[in-house]
Amino acid sequence: MEDCNVHSAASILASVKEQEARFERLTRALEQERRHVALQLERAQQPGMVSGGMGGGQPLPMAWQQLVLQEQSPGSQASLATMPEAPDVLEETVTVEEDPGTPTSHVSIVTSEDGTTRRTETKVTKTVKTVTTRTVRQVPLGPDGLPLLDGGPPLGPFADGALDRHFLLRGGGPAATLSRAYLSSGAGFPEGPEPRDSSSYGSLSRGLGVRPPRAGPLGPGPGDGCFTLPGHREAFSVGPEPGPPGGRSLPERFQAEPYGLEDDTRSLAADDEGGPELEPDYGTATRRRPECGRGLHTRAYEDAADDGGELTDQRPAFPAVTAPLAQPERGSLGSLDRLVRRSPSVDSARKEPRWRDPELPEVLAMLRHPVDPVKANAAAYLQHLCFENEGVKRRVRQLRGLPLLVALLDHPRAEVRRRACGALRNLSYGRDTDNKAAIRDCGGVPALVRLLRAARDNEVRELVTGTLWNLSSYEPLKMVIIDHGLQTLTHEVIVPHSGWEREPNEDSKPRDAEWTTVFKNTSGCLRNVSSDGAEARRRLRECEGLVDALLHALQSAVGRKDTDNKSVENCVCIMRNLSYHVHKEVPGADRYQEAEPGPLGSAVVSQRRRRDDASCFGGKKAKEEWFHQGKKDGEMDRNFDTLDLPKRTEAAKGFELLYQPEVVRLYLSLLTESRNFNTLEAAAGALQNLSAGNWMWATYIRATVRKERGLPVLVELLQSETDKVVRAVAIALRNLSLDRRNKDLIGSYAMAELVRNVRNAQAPPRPGARLEEDTVVAVLNTIHEIVSDSLDNARSLLQARGVPALVALVASSQSVREAKAASHVLQTVWSYKELRGSLQKDGWTKARFQSAAATAKGPKGAPSPGGFDDSTLPLVDKSLEGEKTGSQDVIPMDALGPDGYSTVDRRERRPRGIGSAGEASEKEPLKLDPSRKAPPPGPSRPAVRLVDAVGDAKPQPVDSWV
Amino acid sequence: MSYIPGQPVTAVVQRVEIHKLRQGENLILGFSIGGGIDQDPSQNPFSEDKTDKVNGWDMTMVTHDQARKRLTKRSEEVVRLLVTRQSLQKAVQQSMLS
């Protein structure tokens, strides 16, 4: 409060004080209100307890109920009418509170059911009866069958207890609700409870007004079980906001649901399971409770987690903040909305433990109800029911509910569309792919895309994109999404949110990416579909603006040092996927192909050397200088270090950006900055993809990684604790070592780390830290690559005490692949005659090297290098033969892919075997080792452009006089 | 104030209007600014006031240099700033929660 500091301007101080004063006033008012309510509660409690416990209170309630019933019954008959009535009832309930009529709540509930179901009085009566009977006895148990938190009075408390529980379960946003309630109560409406106007919505709104009485009514009502209720009730009422009409039929549930839904959503989002983190996005659903500040939200959440009882306490805090904000926003919603909100509260207060939930078929039938709010509520309730409940999801499909929901996506009323989409999001989540297929079969994808195009409402956009993300994890839907949604997703979401502008305005600052939920969902969806094979990649690459926007977003992330979030991860994964096989799939790629390397193995060197491409242009001075600068520590004569980029008359754009050497810096920045393992893995994978293949661009990329001092960055990541990061980096290093200078450098500086990983494979530093087979194999293959054809590197291996580690691995590994890969390396080492002397001095014999290989691989014939290469090459050349490839390269990719790609389902999907091999390999475009064949290493000449890029990090002034 | 990228920020702000001084060709405001999204926040010499808007331009995501240019535009003799500061925020929060 004090605050003002040295620097503060007088005006600021003044204003602060003024604001403080205002807030104090507000606070006082709130405090008063709170006390008032508290008093009421106390009063209410005692009577309630007595009546409830004793059962003495019952007679009265019963009578009351009957009255209500009679009135209602007419309403129930008219199905349509029912809806409206329900609200009225609710209001009545409120009023009732004043009276002893706890039972009222029962009535209201009943009504609602009727309305929904259209079942008439009978049901109502039944319900009522049940209620009455049980009220007395079942006090302790909530509807759930869970014990009530507070041993409140039978009726009222019950309801509340149950609700609370709901909240708790869902991590509900009680806070939000509370605040709202607060407002309403604070409004200090007259107590006039106009109970049941069975009129239409208009009347409903009135009912809302009634609400305020609640404070008053509560006190008197014995059976109300108001104790805890006040707080709870409010909370509920607020929460529900979303579903307007729903209030009546499933009032309380509804309310609670929204939260549940959101949670569900969260999970749907496929984010990592960081539930809590997500909350801000999903849970809060800005839209729903705009009024609550973020902070508040969270708080509410936490509190809720503790205990239902706490809600009451919380209430005070929230109200102040929320109230002011909330009110204004809500206004626009109209009377219905309001009604709904309140009605729920009423219900919750009154609700009997026993009221009957509508059966699933009934809920689905309500989706066709002629009254729109009923539809919306039914959909909202459905969303709730589906949350984390695979059984319900399945039944919804079996009952043919999905086409109904999809049809509602085009409904004229926004609320209906939104609710339907919310339900679809939950229904589309999970490992059960049948629902996804069913949504497709009824035209769900185009309908969702239409809705995205039409919707300006952010929540709807979040829901649509979330649903699409869920759907995108199912292989057969990927191309469908691309066909119908790629353009829209790119132009409606990715481009605008990325901050990229086609024609940047020089006056305005470059825009940064906005990591909105919509962007996250959309990028997740595209990430999934980008793994669907060559055609999918082609479509994405050629989608105008997509690559540009993704790159811009990533650059902005790096610039802001905000590289750990999910959106960045998604973007990098898309980039990695699109970089896969870029050297063969990009239009015009053949122009850049380099001569095929001849035989592999030791002969490669000479071949590499002789390669000279037509693509090289004369060097300019700048290039030369740059080049020499960069290469101080290498053996100049060994490489052709001057690379010329093909001349371009225009700046690269679109898919060309994927493989421009400039991207190297971006990926290296991510590798340096990010703490998100998936991002690290994807960035390393992108470099891996780009440095594979024998086309010019790969040559440039390999050289650029070195010039940008990327090798140390990669080597350091070999120490990562995350298996897949180690794997991706190891494979990237192998591809990079196709460049001769890289190979020398990697041999000198990375050998120790590589060998350490080999050692860890046998003796994990700590339990559970053993590297996966794929990773070990990747590391061994990398060692093999850098040792081949380089005596110096083979020496490095000996110095790093790699031989004992390899021999031990061959002897002890349970994995044939590991043993085989290790023995390949040993064989290669032995092939250097120069080394045999020292090896023998150390006590090694030839048998050790060759027998190992022989035993491990059976046919010793498979030359170490050859065997290795084979596995790799297939990926490049025949990516479709997933299985074969799989052994080395594919698998790693798979592993990556599933994770990276299908967010939601990834975990489920993991089973590598599932996808067709071809797909898998494609997904994980990571690795192309074709490099081997490529002669490339030889020539790496720096390009002028690279130089520029390198130079631009200039320190900025820390402060300026203005 | 915690800031979640992509999400609207709620901040308590103070309006400040400054008539610039003429100094040769330039219009100056007479104080120093620090920070900017390209700066290391821990090196920031001024941690108190944050400028959210200048003449309607959002300054929450600009580089230091962009901010400087925006503030010293020669075509604008007056700048209207929205300024926030931690203590202001706290004061408001406390009064709301107490």
Image (cartoon, rainbow, N blue to C red):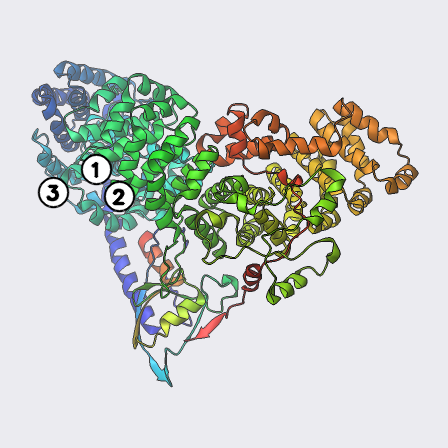
Question: Which mark is drawn over residue A190?
Answer: 3
In this view, the residue in front, A251 or A821, is A821
Tell me if label 1 and label 3 are in contact, CB under 8 Å.
Answer: no
Q: Is residue A955 left or right of residue A350?
A: right
- What is the three-letter code of the residue carrying label 2? Asp
- Same chain under badges 1 and 2? The reply is yes
Tell me if label 1 and label 2 are in contact, CB under 8 Å.
yes
A9 left or right of A369?
right
Q: Chain of mark 1?
A: A
Disc with the residue nearer the chain's start (2 vs 3): 3
Identify the secondary structure beneath mark 1. helix
Q: Name the residue nearer the viewer: A443 or A353.
A: A443
Q: Which element is circle 3 on?
A: loop
Circle 2 is placed at which residue position? A457
Please report whichever mark, 1 or 2, sits nearer to the chain's N-terminal start.
1
Of A596 and A546, nearer the camera is A596
Give the residue at x 64% y 57%: A642
At which x and y percent is residue A529?
A: 43, 35
In the image, residue A786 sits, relative to residue A664, either above or below, namely: above
Disc 1/disc 2 C-alpha distance (Å): 9 Å
> Does residue A763 show up?
no
Name the residue that disc number 1 marks: A414
Write the residue at 74% across / 36% down: A759
Same-subunit check for callouts 2 and 3: yes
Q: Is residue A322 above or below residue A267?
A: below
Tell me the quarter of the image containing the C terminus of chain A.
Answer: bottom left
Residue density around tag 2, few if under 14, some if 14–19, many if 20 or more, within 10 Å: few
* Residue situated in front as seen by the camera: A462 or A713: A713
| Residue found at the very far bottom of the displayed protein | B24
Of the numbered discs 1 and 3, the one sitting upstream in the chain is 3
Contact check, label 2 and label 3, Cβ < 8 Å: no
Counting from the top left corner in percent of width and height, residue A182 is at 24, 44
